[in-house]
Image: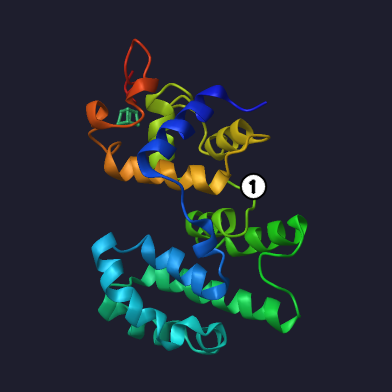
Amino acid sequence: MADERLLAAADLLRSHYGRLDLDLYRDGWVGLVRFLLERQFSPSKFAKVWPEIEASWIVAVEEVARGTRGDLLEFLQPYGGNATSVAVLHRLAVWWQEQVDRGQTPFEAGTSHLESAWSELAAHDRTWITRVFCVIGGLQKYPLTRASWRVACRHRWLSWHDESDEIPEFFEQGLRDSPIELGQFAEWMMQVGDDYCGSKPKCTQCPLQPLLGPNGICEPDE
Ligand code: SF4
């Protein structure tokens, strides 16, 4: 059964941020490139650089997979791309091209195939790979991020003393059998973490403020 607290959070976050346009990110390799870069740049920077990137060689997955990580870094660095996102993008391009060469459509294989690809790729960068597989592939794996951890503990849904493995599990179970896409919810939580729930929470302006109980937020030293 879905967790009512998460359903209430989803309602508030949907009203505040609106839905992600998932079709944009599920539009083949170009959608994946867009997803990764959009999350790395500010909205104004992304709007400025995307038309040029979208017209470049990096939207051809076979070229990215055939090239080196250094080629990709050399191309993306002037736009503000960093080594971490470039490594993830290159790793995903190689995987994507392998699927195409086998006659498979990436992210359209069965769940067990996706899960085994995820566990292999996640060894390189668990958070980013999980974000991509969850949002674009629809895999039921929740990305562990500091933002989700902070929100869950500050709202007393979890304890600051819980093991980190328990955090993704809490969201995966809490949203199972609910109409809320796990990837959509995870991206909302990262957004609210960036905008309001950083090291100094801005509860009075935050869309999740109505969900705080009478004792307010729980901080790690409580
Ligand atoms: S800023 Fe406050 S209300 Fe918003 S998510 Fe964090 S603890 Fe909750």
The quarter holding residue 12 reads: top left
Q: Which structural element holds mark 1?
A: loop
Query: In the displayed structure, does residue 22 sit left or right of residue 200?
Result: right
Q: Nearer the viewer, residue 84 or 30?
A: 30
Q: Identify the residue shown where x is 55% and y is 84%.
A: 65
Rendered location of residue 4, percent (x, y): 55, 23
Q: How many badges with numbers are in the image?
A: 1
Q: Residue furthest top?
A: 214
The image shows residue 103 at horizontal and vertical percentages of: 76, 80
Q: Is residue 42 visible?
A: no
Q: Is residue 185 visible?
A: yes
Position of residue 64 measured from the top left corner of the image (x, y, whole percent): 50, 84
Taking the spot 55% from the left edge, 77% from the top edge, the residue there is 93
Compared across the picture, whether 170 is left or right of 116 comes to: left
* 195 shown above or below 203: below
Residue at the disc numbered 1: 140
Q: Position of residue 24 (x, y in %)?
A: 50, 64
